[in-house]
Amino acid sequence: MRAHLAVLPGDGIGPEVIAPARACLEAIAARYGHTFHFEECAFGGAAIDRHGEPLPRATLQACQAADAVLLGAIGGPRWGGSAARQRPEAGLLALRRGLEVYANLRPVQVQPALRDASTLRPEILDGVDLVFVRELTGGIYFGEKRRTATEASDLCLYTVAEVERIVRRAAALARARRRRLTSIDKANVLETSRLWREVTSRVMAAEFADVTLEHLLVDAAAMHLIRRPRDFDVLVTENLFGDILTDEAAMLTGSLGLLPSASLGEGRRGLYEPIHGSAPDLAGRDLANPFGAILSAALLLRHSLGLETEARALEGAVAATLEAGVRTADLAAPGADTLGTRAAGAAVLSRLRPRA
């Protein structure tokens, strides 16, 4: 297979975690007989510094022409503050819209080797294997924003069509897994959530009667995600709630640095990134966890390139690395030996199986 991959290292630890993820993709290509062409593009704060905007036209065009996009992380205090003219996060929202990726998949699996890394009791974590499907291009993040000297407002807007398509995506995923879908809203307060619940119930009854549907209010979902995480299969929710709950879910695995994500639209092209931020306090110190970025590369292989065997090989290499006791600082007990970003990435590379 030949594939054109756009690479957006971004800011902070982004370039550091993207380097081993790219190296793993290069190794997969070499071992399985593929040709991957990588095109590195400026994005986020780095693009503001170089081009005066977080998403230059050339970067967007390169991403739209690519088979898939691999992103590190964006943002940092140097581009923040209330007086900032350009924010890196605005570029991310524009990129999602420009690529028409509306479904953000965030798988959460507890690695057996890391049962003790979470702050929860190990017996609560046994068997946890869930996927969040977060609506990505609607809701309060994209609604009209107003601010005066005395007040501010953010509009949360959803259309029936937006809810229908994300529910169908999540339900199809649930049908291929354990046939359980949990829809999360705040229908006791918000009109958008009442619409969300009504549309979800209608779509599921008409098209996915073989999938069990559960509705949960977002506050209850936050509690049950910690209380009974292994009861969940696929969870679908709107943009803001998904952003918050998936960071909470990351603590089931022991670290935010472990979780990958895939942002998908109607076609095969997707945007792949670890869910963590740019962690400017860690940047340049070889301390960041690269596993989330590497696992995002595995999702890229699976969803955009259709290379399931290769995706499983890469995920298996990460699991074998953790089973061997390799730990980055965020995963280690106090005083335990740790590896830096580069060495942890090399440990995964060394465990990639040759093609059978």
Image (cartoon, helix red, strand yellow):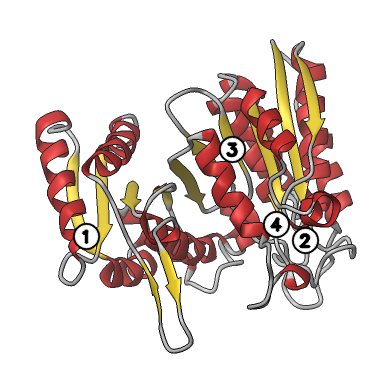
Where residue 13 sits, quadrant-wise, is: bottom right
Question: What residue is drawn where x is 19% and y is 37%?
Answer: 211
Residue type at numbered disc 1? Ser
Q: Dot 1: what SS?
A: helix
Q: Alpha carbon of mark 1 to alpha carbon of mark 3: how far?
A: 27 Å
Mark 1 or mark 3: whose residue is earlier in sequence: 1
Q: Real-space Cα distance between discs 2 and 4? A: 21 Å
The disc at residue 328 is 2
The three-letter code of the residue at mark 3 reads Leu
In the depicted view, which residue is nearer to us: 352 or 192? Answer: 192
Q: Amino acid at mark 4?
A: Ile
Extreme residue toward the front, this view? 148
Q: Nearer the viewer, residue 26 or 47?
A: 47
- Helix, strand or loop at label 2? It is loop
What label sits on residue 193 in the rendered view?
1
Q: Are marks 2 and 4 in contact (CB under 8 Å)?
A: no
Left or right: residue 230 versus residue 246 is left
Q: Are marks 4 and 3 in contact (CB under 8 Å)?
A: no
Question: Pointer 1: residues within 10 angstroms few (<14), some, or many (20+)?
Answer: some
Front tag of 3 and 2: 3
Question: In the structure shown, which secondary structural element does the residue marked by tag 4 occupy?
Answer: loop
Location of residue 83 with respect to 87 vertically, above or below = below
Residue ID for mark 4: 74
Q: Earlier in the sequence, mark 4 or mark 3?
A: 4
Per the image, label 3 sits on a secondary structure element best described as strand
Viewer-nearest residue: 24 or 268? 268
Q: Is residue 16 visible?
A: yes
Mark found first going from the N terminus, 2 or 1: 1
Residue pictured at 51% horizontal, 64% vertical = 247
- Quadrant where the image shows the C terminus: top right
